Image (spheres, rainbow, N blue to C red):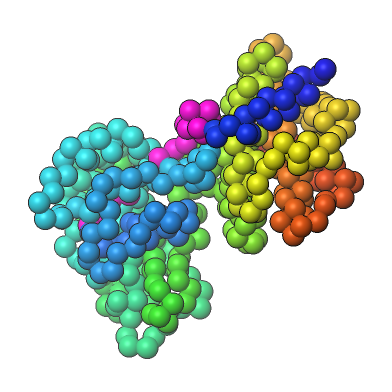
Amino acid sequence: MSWLNRLWDRVSAELFVAPKAAAILPAAAPVVWLLGKTGAGKTSIVAALTGDTRAEIGPGFRPCTRTAAFYDLPPEAPLLRFLDTRGLEESDYDADADLTWSEGQSHLLLAVMRVNDLAQDAVVRVLKAVRHRHPGWGLIVAQTALHTLYPPNVPHPPAYPYTGGAEDEINPALPHPLRQALAYQRRQLDSLPGPRPIFVPLDFTDADDLYPPAAFGIDALLTAMATAGADAAAALRRVAIARDIDRVHAGSQRLVLGCATAAAVSGAVPVPAVGIGGVASAVAVMLRGMGERYGVQWTRANFARFTGAIGIGGLAWLGVRFGVVELAKLVPVAGSILGGTLNAAAAFSIVYGTAEAARVWLRYQSTGTVAPTDEVRRAFLTGLREGLRRHRDERRRT
């Protein structure tokens, strides 16, 4: 029996026992720390970026984050983690202990300020203290609630007009009170140690507010986060590919990329001696999560049919071998570094290829039909090659 057959045996064994993803998969995702006063829009940002239903949005200045909470993207195998903390200046709240703890968890700062709230002294004090200790940390300042300074019945501009620089303060297309408020908040941060913050004007509204789109400027925030920190950028690049496709596909794609990344970490040690366990865990977590997203319950019988459809013997080995040979052309060194690189690529590709096959299989299953074997196999081989390409491109970027 080949190591690939043993892999599927391990996947099958783990798939039907509720996996504890946090214990199985590496928890190495970068952490974005959100800071701001109550009602600034921190939780709105978390909800817009992660889709996490725990991120309850509170109206106005009512606090909605009672304790610091992590929101993982995706939850099963996070590529990126958001740390949402209680609002500064809440009554009867001493933030010092929470701030010290949060600082020790974080890699990137995201400060949130309502543009119609000019009293940001508490936020500025915290940012100065953190930047004194970590002058190299990336800092993004999200300036929210833009529409509160629009004239009556004026909508958002048809195209996002903000640069985050001095151009925003003289742009005649923006209302004068808004330009003044943006400039005033930015001047408050001129004395911060370290590089200049990246400023991103944003607006989050409800459908009843009649200010479409509901998350105005969210793409600019993603770009800023990619610019502010290399680790966060790598995660965001992988997440962003799912933005323009259907919701189920988007959710499952984030899960796939998280699990494939975790498998690549495990695959850096020789397969099958150690890495096969991490790869099997990643595939099991991924298949379980994809089944939930497509509304399909995995059983031993349909898992056997699925693995039979993708052809876990010669077909899979040819696909992986193709990937390893192609990657070898790009790696000029030998020994353990080469072995780890090839195994990481193979692990990433196996998870990605399995996901593409599972997507076809589950889509048919969700409609009560059986997926054609040739379509599942084509998806698997295509996924192996695409997984290799993604892994190779990510290594080049980072």
Q: Quadrant of residue 270?
A: top right
Is 290 in front, or is 255? 290
Apparent side of residue 273 relative to residue 17 in the rendered image (left or right): right
In x, y percent, where is residue 373? 88, 45
Instruction: Give the residue displayed 65% in from the left and 60% down from the top.
Output: 245
Q: Bounds of the magenta span?
A: 20-37
Q: In which quadrant of the rendered image does the C terminus lie?
A: top right
Q: Nearer the viewer, residue 242 or 247?
A: 247
Observer-nearest of 69 and 342: 69
**Res 239 visible:** yes
Residue at image position (69%, 30%) is 12
Q: Reply yes or no: does residue 270 show up in magenta.
A: no
Residue 341 appears in the rendering: no
Q: Position of residue 356 (x, y in %)?
A: 74, 45
Task: Left or right? Give the position of 327 relative to 35.
Answer: right
At 31% across and 52% down in the image, what residue appears? 111
Q: Residue at x 73, y 33 (%)?
A: 350
